[in-house]
């Protein structure tokens, strides 16, 4: 540790420099020393929680993030990190509680558009949507992806997931319309083209499916899904009856 680091601010600065170099052990020592000097600094606990989580010390990480939030209930980064960590260790209910509690605070105290916060919140909604999909709860999943899309309208990946939910629920036309709308704003989204091809194929619109998958491969020649679907379609004798 740098002998010149005599204040909490100095130690936090050193810890951040260590983290930038991925020197976790050194960062941990600096942060623990900072907390010994002053155990009322939320950033020290937040950074220590991050170090603990990276080193696999999950119980300690949770305690550190919780302490950061106890000192500063509006510490967004600590709340998001704690929510994510709860999900990682299988405590989904606790993760959701932290996430929604933080979102409520932000809605009350931070009106307006903040891209950094919106991205973090959108990511949590996206992850929650994927969680619901795992249990085939497509309505709830669609709701989460819709919230993510509202926070980040330019992120068409949320629309792709919404389309998957609609398709699984039986509303394929709505799914197709959603993907078309998304591709109007982002015509180079490979994932949207692959999914649109899947939907067209399910409706026996083989020419349209072929076109979408071919365009997906032209945008991303290494895309395994598009390659697989296109190869299956071209190997299907019945597909030639549709002039693919």
Image: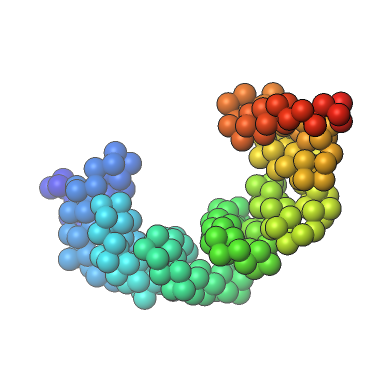
- What residue is drawn where x is 19% and y is 47%? 26
Q: Residue 236's quadrant in the figure?
A: top right
Asked if residue 122 is positioned above or below residue 65 in the image, the reply reads above
Say if residue 211 shows up in the picture. no
Please state the horizontal and vertical placement of residue 121, each as a whole percent of the image: 56, 60
- What is the x, y in percent for residue 136? 61, 63
From the viewer's perspective, is 201 left or right of 37? Answer: right
Q: Nearer the viewer, residue 15 or 243?
A: 243
Image coords of residue 228 (percent x, y):
62, 32
Q: Looking at the rendering, which quadrant does residue 22 occupy?
A: top left
In the picture, measured across the screen, residue 72 lies left or right of residue 100, that is: left
Q: Relative to the observer, which residue lies in front, 20 or 190?
A: 190
Position of residue 199 relative to residue 98, above or below, is above
**Which residue is at 45% across, 69% downward?**
92
Asked which colour scheme the image uses, the reply is rainbow
Q: Quadrant of the C terminus?
A: top right
The location of residue 84, given as percent across then percent down, is 44, 61
156 or 220, nearer to the observer: 220
Farthest residue, direction left: 3
Could you tell me which residue is drawn at 80 percent across and 48 percent down?
176
The front one of 14 and 216 is 216
Question: Is residue 167 positioned above or below 45 on the image?
Answer: above
| View extreme (front): residue | 237
Q: Is residue 46 visible?
A: yes
């Amino acid at each position: 540790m740098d002998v010149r680091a005599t204040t909490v601010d100095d130690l936090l600065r050193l810890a951040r420099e260590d983290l930038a170099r991925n020197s976790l052990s050194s960062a941990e020592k600096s942060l623990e020393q900072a907390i010994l000097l002053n155990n009322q600094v939320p950033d020290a606990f937040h950074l220590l929680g991050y170090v603990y989580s990276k080193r696999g010390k999950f119980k300690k990480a949770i305690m550190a993030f919780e302490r950061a939030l106890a000192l500063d209930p509006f510490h967004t980064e600590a709340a998001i990190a704690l929510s994510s960590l709860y999900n990682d260790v299988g405590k989904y209910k606790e993760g959701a509680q932290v996430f929604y509690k933080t979102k409520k605070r932000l809605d009350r105290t931070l009106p307006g558009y903040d891209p950094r916060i919106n991205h973090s919140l959108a990511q949590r909604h996206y992850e929650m949507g994927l969680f619901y999909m795992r249990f085939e709860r497509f309505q709830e999943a669609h709701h989460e992806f819709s919230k993510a899309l509202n926070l980040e309208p330019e992120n068409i990946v949320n629309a792709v997931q919404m389309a998957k939910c609609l398709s699984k629920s039986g509303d394929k036309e709505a799914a197709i319309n959603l993907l078309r709308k998304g591709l109007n704003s982002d015509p180079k989204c490979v994932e949207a083209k692959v999914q649109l091809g899947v939907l067209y194929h399910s409706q026996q619109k083989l020419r349209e499916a072929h076109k979408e998958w071919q365009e997906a491969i032209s945008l991303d020649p290494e895309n395994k899904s598009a390659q697989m679907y296109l190869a299956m379609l071209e190997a299907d004798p019945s597909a030639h009856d549709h002039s693919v």
